[in-house]
Image: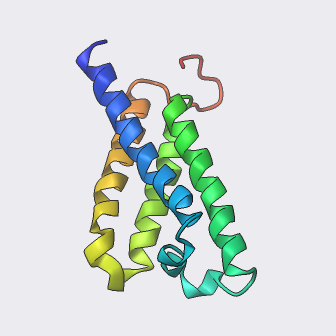
Amino acid sequence: MNAEKVAHLLLRAGVAFAFLYPPLNALVDPNSWIGYFPAFVKGYVPDAILLHAFGVVEVGIALWILSGWRIFWPSLIAAAMLLGIVMFNPSNFQVLFRDISIAAMALALVMLSWSNGRAGFAGETKT
């Protein structure tokens, strides 16, 4: 494996881990995670359902990123989710500052897929 492929794999594994840990940990400690949801999304469904439904989305994003298939899209979604979490929780910045670094990793994957023609736009043939 050349250095670029290893770097790409490390970026994917790092971002995926950041999306796998919270939903798995929320199974045993949901109270540590529910507070990161902004107030405007809470109250429509029970907190446990909201938390675990979001967890399913996180696991889906993580597995998609790990697969490397059309990496542009899950990486862009991951970056947006991470930046949204930081923006809607400014009082928790002492903890969430790390999400900016992970979002930068996701954006690096976006840029790499764009420059390598693996963005997954209609009509593309590269994988």
Q: In this view, does 10 lie above or below 79?
A: above
Query: Which image quarter holds the N terminus?
Result: top left
Percent across and percent down for residue 108 are 33, 41
> Residue 49: x, y in percent?
72, 71
Residue at point 24%, 19% (across, down): 3
Residue that sits furthest to the right in the current view: 45
Left-right relation of 43 to 115: right
Location of the C terminus by quadrant is top right
Q: Residue at x 40, y 46 (%)?
A: 15
Q: How is the image coloured?
A: rainbow
> Who's the residue at 61% across and 86% down the image?
40
Viewer-side residue, 121 vs 66: 66
Image spot of residue 26 (x, y percent): 55, 65
Rendered location of residue 19, percent (x, y): 48, 52
Residue at 50 percent of width and 34 percent of height: 66
- Up-down relation of residue 45 to residue 11 (above or below): below
